[in-house]
Image: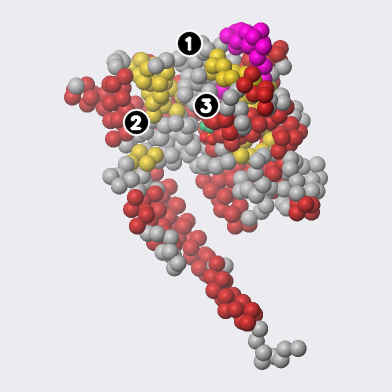
């Protein structure tokens, strides 16, 4: 027996460590002060957005950040916010600007940030139902909401991923397993997609062990939509030569041009030949909320799987995509896995656990960043903003088509407008460089049919008529600069 005077060296060490370790559990006063400081920083950031450039590039490209290394003592919150302000938040693409129409924008509806904040503070475990029935029900409710948007039956299931690339990967893996594409069969297995399909599909196939599968690039029509008759012919030819068609990846719409592949006609081909019909609607899926979009996306409800990206057309900050599969048990079949240390966590009450529907286990409680904005605003303003984007694209396309200096691509299916300065690739390249140097607005380029092509992707909830008008005005100014100098 120890006397009270005796000290156990282990306990003594624990007593020494405790107050030091408690530093991580910030006391209320400091916590509130830090929250206020971050809130003030965020608020100042957003208030400055009206006139903020859409693109900035400094000579040192944020390298000054590295002069403050991670250290034993830490720099403190004020210093850290100062570093963010100097080196991170004002350089590169300003994806929170309504004048940013490059790539596929994000935006970042504010309430999503509040959802992230709460998800981080409460740290609900959204991987398995047992751990947080409420969090899992919420994520499944969102999946169900998207399944209804697509027009899927009650059998549908899915999960909220970190983004469209991961969601496409999970779809490919699911389809691969359903069609038993493995081992010796891989080099004979054929995947059909157009040249405009997103490059993450190629990546997904490689990551899924299907790098040796045959990729059949189906020709597109004059509006860059997959030619369904050419698809039918390609499938028939491949069957005749002893190959094994198994997967069609349609885009709705493409990142490149916003074109929507003819989903209904492609669904016919898929069902005729018993192929998995996947629709990559990472960009276009949420246009289902609009009347125009619903019309254009007809046939999506016949897919086996659909990817949509709330961090694109639901205007959420980056870090959330979604995969919805018509028969949810099929994703589960590919991803269910178990271990003895998970034995307490098997209860489900009929809910699918995200960990059984994806490659992840422990994950961010992403549902909250989507659920909170939808609960706060309701769906209506999202629908209105999406309709506004479609009409802004139509407006920009009409203005560009009217101008003497530009030639336009086909009328946009969705909210991407493609156009060129009449003239050489080089003139177009110089114009884009001038736009990027100027920085007031930002858009990007692509190559279509071998030609350098400019594109506006109008996908920010902050883009309104004046922003797009400014974009066209900046273009006009810079064109005259360039032509005067040439
Ligand atoms: C953006 C995009 C992807 C990739 O999604 P991430 O969220 O960037 O990973 C896939 N397909 C299409 C059509 C896209 O627009």
Tell me what residue is drawn at x 54 percent, y 38 percent.
311
User: Which residue is labeled 3 in the image?
Assistant: 198
Q: Is residue 186 above or below residue 134?
A: above
Identify the residue shown where x is 37% and y is 17%.
451
Q: Which mark is residue 477?
A: none
Query: Bounds of the magenta span?
Result: 229-253
Residue 432 in view in this figure: yes
Q: Quadrant of residue 93?
A: top left
**Mark number, residue 222:** 1
Viewport quadrant of the N terminus:
bottom right
Q: Give the residue number, with chain letter if any, for mark 2.
A: 470
Rounded to the nearest angstrom, the CA distance separating label 2 from label 3 is: 29 Å
* Callout 3 secondary element: loop
Please state if 160 lies on the left or on the right of 137 as rendered: left
Label 3 Cα neighbours within 10 Å, binned few <14 / some 14-19 / many ≥20: many
Looking at the picture, how far across and down is residue 195, in whole percent? 50, 19
In contact (CB < 8 Å): disc 2 and disc 1: no
Image spot of residue 179 (x, y percent): 71, 24
Residue 319 sits in which quadrant?
A: top right
Say whether residue 245 is magenta. Answer: yes
């Amino acid at each position: 027996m120890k006397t009270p005077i005796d000290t156990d060296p282990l306990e003594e060490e624990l007593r020494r460590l405790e107050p030091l370790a408690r530093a991580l559990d910030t006391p209320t006063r400091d916590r509130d002060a830090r929250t206020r400081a971050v809130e003030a920083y965020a608020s100042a950031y957003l208030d400055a957005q009206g006139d903020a450039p859409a693109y900035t590039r400094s000579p040192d490209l944020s390298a000054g950040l590295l002069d403050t290394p991670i250290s034993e003592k830490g720099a403190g919150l004020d210093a850290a916010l100062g570093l963010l302000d100097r080196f991170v938040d004002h350089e590169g693409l300003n994806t929170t600007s309504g004048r940013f129409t490059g790539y596929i924008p994000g935006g970042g509806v504010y309430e999503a940030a509040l959802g992230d904040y709460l998800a981080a503070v409460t740290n609900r475990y959204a991987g398995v139902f047992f751990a947080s029935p409420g969090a899992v029900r919420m994520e499944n409710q969102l999946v169900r909401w998207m399944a209804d948007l697509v027009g899927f039956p009650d059998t549908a299931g899915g999960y909220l991923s970190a983004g469209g690339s991961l969601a496409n990967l999970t779809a490919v893996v699911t389809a691969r397993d359903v069609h038993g594409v493995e081992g010796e069969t891989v080099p004979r297995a054929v995947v059909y997609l157009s040249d405009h399909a997103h490059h993450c599909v190629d990546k997904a196939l490689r990551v899924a062990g299907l790098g040796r599968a045959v990729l059949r690039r189906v020709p597109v029509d004059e509006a860059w939509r997959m030619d369904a008759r050419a698809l039918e012919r390609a499938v028939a030819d491949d069957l005749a030569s002893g190959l094994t068609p198994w997967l069609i990846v349609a885009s709705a719409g493409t990142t490149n041009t916003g074109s929507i592949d003819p989903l209904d006609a492609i669904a016919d081909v898929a069902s005729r030949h018993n192929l998995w019909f996947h629709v990559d609607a990472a960009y276009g899926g949420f246009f289902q909320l609009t009347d125009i979009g619903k019309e254009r996306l007809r046939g999506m409800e016949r897919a086996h799987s659909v990817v949509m990206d709330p961090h694109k057309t639901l205007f959420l900050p980056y870090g959330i995509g979604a995969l919805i599969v018509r028969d949810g048990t099929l994703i589960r079949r590919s991803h269910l896995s178990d271990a003895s240390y998970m034995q307490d966590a098997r209860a489900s009450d009929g809910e699918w656990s995200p960990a059984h529907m994806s490659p992840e286990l422990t994950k961010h409680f992403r549902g909250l960043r989507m659920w909170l904005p939808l609960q706060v605003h309701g769906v209506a303003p999202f629908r209105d903003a999406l309709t506004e984007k479609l009409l802004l694209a139509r407006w920009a396309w009409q203005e560009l088509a009217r101008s003497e200096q530009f030639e336009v691509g086909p009328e946009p299916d969705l909210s991407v407008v493609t156009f060129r300065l009449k003239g050489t690739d080089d003139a177009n390249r110089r114009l884009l460089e001038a736009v990027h140097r100027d920085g007031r607005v930002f858009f990007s380029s692509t190559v279509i049919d071998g030609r350098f092509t400019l594109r506006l992707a109008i996908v920010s909830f902050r883009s309104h008529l004046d922003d797009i008008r400014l974009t066209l005005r900046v273009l006009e100014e810079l064109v005259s600069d360039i032509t005067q100098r040439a």
